Each structure stands twice: as structure tokens, then as C-alpha cells.
Image (tube, grey):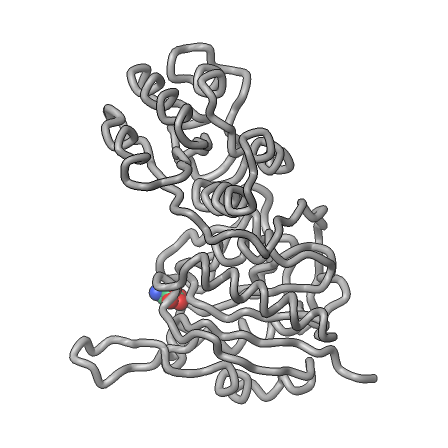
Amino acid sequence: MALPRLLFLSLGGTITMVPTDSASGGIAPKLGAAELVASVPALAQTASIEARSPFKLPSPSLTIANLIEVARTINESFAAGFDGAVVIQGTDTIEESAFILDLLVPGDKPVVITGAMRGADAPGADGPANLLAAARVGASADARALGALAVLNYDIHAARFVQKSHTALPSAFLSPLVGALGVVAEGRPRFYARIARNPCLPIDAGPPGPIALVKVPMGDDGRQLKSLPDLGFVGAVIEAMGAGHVHADVAPILAELAAKIPVVLASRSMTGPVFEATYGYPGGEIDLINRGLIPSGYLSGLKARLLLGLALRAGSDRARIREAFRPYQ
Ligand code: ASP
């Protein structure tokens, strides 16, 4: 039987990094997708792979525009008959890239994103195992219709839930709200939970506008919020306290901001939904929603920022932005 056809796209990241000759003495991206694939012989028994390297960047230097380009390439490859895609990149922004691909690649074919916490030359490098696990998920019929998946350390995470939760360990990736959807064990992906896909957004839309992400600390008086429209931000996500709360004096500032640009209310807590109907004090979530803020549901501030930006890019008005967030409540 013919092997599934997978497109491997490498964007860079630690998985591609080796020591450089530069003065810094650190590691930097060097390897391309073809070298990564060649370094894991078992991949040849898993899939028929086409390897491309559109970027060789550390993932903090990736942009939303870069990921829109990646989503476009994947959509084109699926139309041309590929059965799945594996995206390789740095782990610092995997949770964001995965969610962009989730929103911009429609259909049932698996899109799997992976990386590594240890450099390609490091003892115990996790890159090869992650690449093989990602390919096995990408080639699996069981991975269809789940949207973009992040596969690291043998865990299979849904794009909308996954978060980088440690700076160093190969087990850095968690889905704190629901856990992983499954694992790769004995070389076979095993899914223990399934999720329904949420609506995608159009890929052919205007350029992404700047969306601010503001965390609210104790005693903050909201002065930076006032400057956001003048700085050119076209939307904002507020990581408020707990279930969606700010100091009472900041509430009118947020109301003023929400009259100018769409403002989404997320939480600075690691996980859990933003509330809508519990706290009645000034600056509580009922007050902020009544003042025009849109609750992010269970989406983290990082992911809410992407959904807001991509919805605005597609020309959505406030009612449609609210609709875009509804599946995540
Ligand atoms: N700083 C690296 C990056 O995101 C970390 C990694 O790949 O694990 O490119």
C-alpha cells in the first residue's frame, strides 16, 4: 500500500540549531527540513515526505504574516493531493503558530506542529523522536478532523488548548484545561479524546493589523491602555485578574478604549474560562462586559489576540467578532 504523502515545512527553532562560530557562542538555526528528515531513517517507513524550508528563524522572529504564508502553502499542498502536513519550528511560539494554522487551514487533513527543547547536537536531543511522532500522527487517519495538533514528548495536544509551560524541559507542553488528546506509544498514535473543529477564518483577507496584549498587575492605573489607539493598535486583549477583573478605576478607561477599538477580556490566570455573570462589583466581569468588552472564553491572551487579529483582518465587525469567540466560551 502506498505511504501517505506528507509535506514537511521547517521554519527553524532549536530543533534545527547547532553551535555557531559567532561571538555569541550559542546555538542558532542551521539545519533545513531535508537534513532533519534524513537524520531520522524511520521516517521513510512512515510517509512519503516532501521537505521544504521556507524559513530558518528562531521562533521569536516569526510573524503572523509568516504563518499566514505557511497556512497558504499547506492549503495548496492539500489541494494538490498531500495527505497531511508537519510544521517544524521553535517551541517559544508553537502555541501561537498552531492556533493560526487551526484557524486558517480548513478541512480534515492532519496539520501537526513540532519542535524540540534541546538543540540538534545536545545529548538526549528530543528533535528526532518528536519528528517521528509528528509524522506518525500526520500520517494517521485517527488524526483527521481535529484541527492543528502539537506533538512533542509523545503527547498530542489540540492547538486551542496547548501552552508552553516550562522554559527547559522536553515535557514543556501542557493543555492545562483538558489534558492532551492522546499519546504516541509503541509508535502508534492513540487518541483518548476527540474535539469538534471550530469555524475557520478566510485566508485571503487584508494584512494583519497590530493587536495589543496587556497584562493587568495589582495597582495598575491603566495609563498604558489610554495610549493604545494613538500607538496604532486596531484591537486589544486584556489579560485581567482571575475570571476577568480589574481595579474599579480602570473600568471606565477600558470602556473608553472599547468605544474606539475592539477589546477582548481574557485572564492572566493560567487556565479556566473568563466569567460572564458572577461578580457584580465595579471592574468585575459583568461591569466590563456591559462596558463593551468581549469575553475570550477559555482562550489564553496569546490565542485570543490571534483570533481577534485574524477576525479583524477578515473585516469582521463587533457582532462578528463576538460570534468568532462564541465557540470558545
Ligand atoms: N528559542 C527557541 C525557539 O523558539 C526555543 C525552541 O525552539 O525550543 O526558536
Quarter for ligand 1?
Answer: bottom left
**In the image shown, does 52 or 312 lie closer to the viewer?**
312
Q: Is residue 33 above or below residue 319?
A: below
Using the rendered view, name the quadrant where residue 25 is placed: bottom left
**Horizontal arrangement in the rendering, residue 115 relative to residue 18 (left or right):** right
Q: What percent of the width, then of the height, locates residue 319?
A: 59, 29
Q: What residue is shown at x 35% (from left), y 64% (from top)?
A: 61
Q: Is residue 166 above or below residue 136?
A: above
67 and 177: which is toward the camera: 67
Q: Is residue 193 left or right of residue 158?
A: right
Q: Residue furthest right?
A: 1
**Image location of residue 234, percent across then percent down:** 40, 39
Give how far across and how far down residue 280 sits, in percent: 46, 10
**Residue 271 vertical position relative to residue 192 in the rendered view, above or below:** above
Quarter of the image that includes the N terminus? bottom right
Query: In this orientation, which residue lies closer to the viewer: 257 or 129?
Result: 257
Asked if 322 appears above or below 99 in the picture, the reply is above
- Which residue is rendered at x = 42% and y = 66% of the image? 90
Number of residue marks = 0
Among the 4 quarters of the image, the one containing residue 98: bottom right
Residue farthest left in this picture: 23
Residue at (61%, 83%) from the top-left corner?
50
Pick the residue in front: 131 or 321.
321
Which quadrant would residue 14 be assigned to in this image?
bottom left
Q: Does residue 158 appear in the picture of this structure?
A: no
Q: Quadrant of the C terminus?
A: top right
- The answer to whether residue 320 shows anywhere in this view is yes
- Image location (x, y in percent) of residue 215: 33, 36
